[in-house]
Image: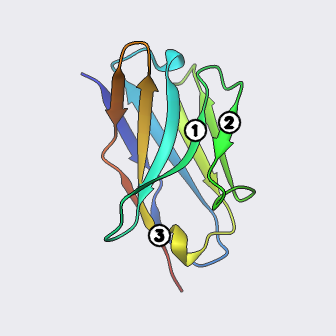
């Protein structure tokens, strides 16, 4: 079965750093565009960042540009998000997403909680 498992979340102080990972299985990971999407308490889903199937391009939401870095390792079927200079407004559940438009597939992980607080 298709699985996306996020890890690395936790409690961190403002200005701190955290690295999230997403382990993928059950599909051809290298063929999919990967994204991080987050949801703050009581809020809707907010797109954070995306990376192309071959890691040839990356995109970031304005709110995280310059602070977050998305990466992938197709040999290990993993997606990562390095988060630096964290702010209270970054507090959310972070979800890993895999999408391939030609097949209409859209897969989601269970999410990992990130809490930024002093």
Residue 14 horizontal/vertical position (percent): 61, 78
Give whichever of discs 2 and 3 has the lower sequence position. Answer: 2
Residue 16's quadrant in the figure?
Answer: bottom right
The answer to whether 105 is drawn above or below residue 92 in the figure is: above
Residue at numbered disc 2: 58
The image position of residue 105, as x and y in percent, is 34, 22
Residue that badge 3 annotates? 91
Judge by depth and name the residue closer to the eye, 83 or 63. Answer: 63
| Mark 3 or mark 1, earlier in chain | 1
Mark before the other along the chain sequence, 2 or 1: 1
Instruction: Give the percent coordinates (x, y) of residue 82.
Output: 63, 51
Q: Residues within 10 Å of mark 1 (few under 14, many from 20)?
A: many
For the residues bearing labels 3 and 1, Cβ distance under 8 angstroms: no
Mark 3 vs mark 1: give the one in front: 1
Question: Circle 1 is placed at which residue position?
Answer: 50
**Quarter assignment of residue 109:** top left
**Where is residue 69 shown, x and y percent of the image?**
68, 48
For the residues labelled 2 and 1, say whether their Cβ atoms are less than 8 Å apart: yes
The residue positioned 30% from the left and 46% from the top of the image is: 110
């Amino acid at each position: 079965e298709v699985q996306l498992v996020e890890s690395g979340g936790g409690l961190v102080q403002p200005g701190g750093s955290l690295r999230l990972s997403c382990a993928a299985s059950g599909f051809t990971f290298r063929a999919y565009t990967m994204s991080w999407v987050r949801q703050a308490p009581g809020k809707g889903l907010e797109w954070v960042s995306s990376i192309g199937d071959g890691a040839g391009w990356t995109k970031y939401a304005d709110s995280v540009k310059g602070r977050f870095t998305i990466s992938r390792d197709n040999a290990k079927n993993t997606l990562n998000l390095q988060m630096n200079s964290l702010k209270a407004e970054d507090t959310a559940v972070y979800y890993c997403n895999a999408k391939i438009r030609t097949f209409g597939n859209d897969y989601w992980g269970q999410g990992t909680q990130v809490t930024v607080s002093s």
